[in-house]
Image (cartoon, rainbow, N blue to C red):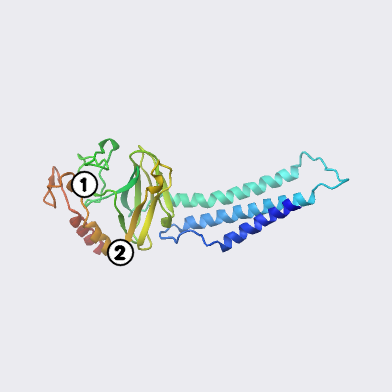
Amino acid sequence: MAIALVLVLIVVGSVLFHFLSPWWWTPIASNWDYIDNTIIITFWITGVVFAAVVLFMAYCVFRFRHREGNRAAYEPESKRLEWWLTVVTAAGVTALLVPGLFVWNRFVNVPSDATDVEVVGQQWQWSFRLPGKDGKLGTSDTRDVTPENPLGVIASDPNGQDDVVVEAADLHLPVGKPVKMLLRSIDVLHDFYVPEFRAKMDMIPGSVTYFWFTPTKTGTFQVLCAELCGQGHSLMHGVVMVDSQEDYLAWLGEQQTFAQLTAPEQTGSADQIPGKTIASGQEIAAELETVGSR
């Protein structure tokens, strides 16, 4: 009797904790309300199953408790029960999987107007690279990583010379513009995760993974590593700031390009790499502002 009562109290307590809990997820700041909806569907399906199973256990404990003179009936098989369990389980699993498949399809199909932004994870900091005036990211290779070239940008690739490099600092993004996050690790497994964006992905050494999202609110958001990556894992924080277009361009104009970082004595658009004119951060911002006003 006491065990049955404890099981009922577990269900009642769980339901009350859900509705009265002061802890909940962070306000969403991207287009991925689809992920929130999928989580809610999953929660209700699993919640109902949890309550039903535990209450059924409580009923069985109470109904079939030991009493003098009662004997248990032995029934090793029940085809009717097996069919019911098979159908109900299949329906539940389908209801759990189908919404996620639709969301995943949207998650990996990037809009054609999304801007590439590279995220580089390493023990234990975040760095970023944005395309320059040409709108293209240059190629990179972990084997090219040096103190002077921390992201491993291949110097012989002209497309990388005007890339904006943000090493161990805040990433800024314009509000309302889709971005494709290209994720790269130069040491161990990491996972780029901003809770308010509802999007994350593992970063695998030797591979480039990706996801996309559209920031919908300006503000400052914390970057977390969602993959245990070593002793300093809990300290691997970063910041993504979602700005208005004007503030974003002002920030972009203050950044240095790869060519400026690797040749600091040469700055500005007068710098020349064979076959490539190198733009400064100010020129890149001006070009984006011009394109945006068209």
Rendered position, 42 above or below 73: below
For label 1, the SS is helix
User: Residue 171: percent from the left, percent from the top?
Assistant: 31, 54
Q: How many marks?
A: 2
Question: From where the camera sits, is residue 213 visible?
Answer: no
User: Residue 257: percent from the left, percent from the top?
Assistant: 20, 49
Dot 1 crowding, Cα within 10 Å, few <14, some 14–19, many 20+: many
Task: Judge from the rendering whether residue 272 lies leftward or rightward of residue 180; answer left or right.
Answer: left
Rendered position, 196 above or below 78: below
Q: Sequence-wise, which precedes: disc 2 or disc 1? A: 2
Dot 2 crowding, Cα within 10 Å, few <14, some 14–19, many 20+: some
Task: Judge from the rendering whether residue 47 lies leftward or rightward of residue 84; answer left or right.
Answer: left
Q: Please give the label number shown on residue 258.
A: 1
Q: Which residue is mark 2?
A: 244
Question: From where the camera sits, is residue 162 visible?
Answer: yes
Task: Judge from the rendering whether residue 195 lies leftward or rightward of residue 131; answer left or right.
Answer: right
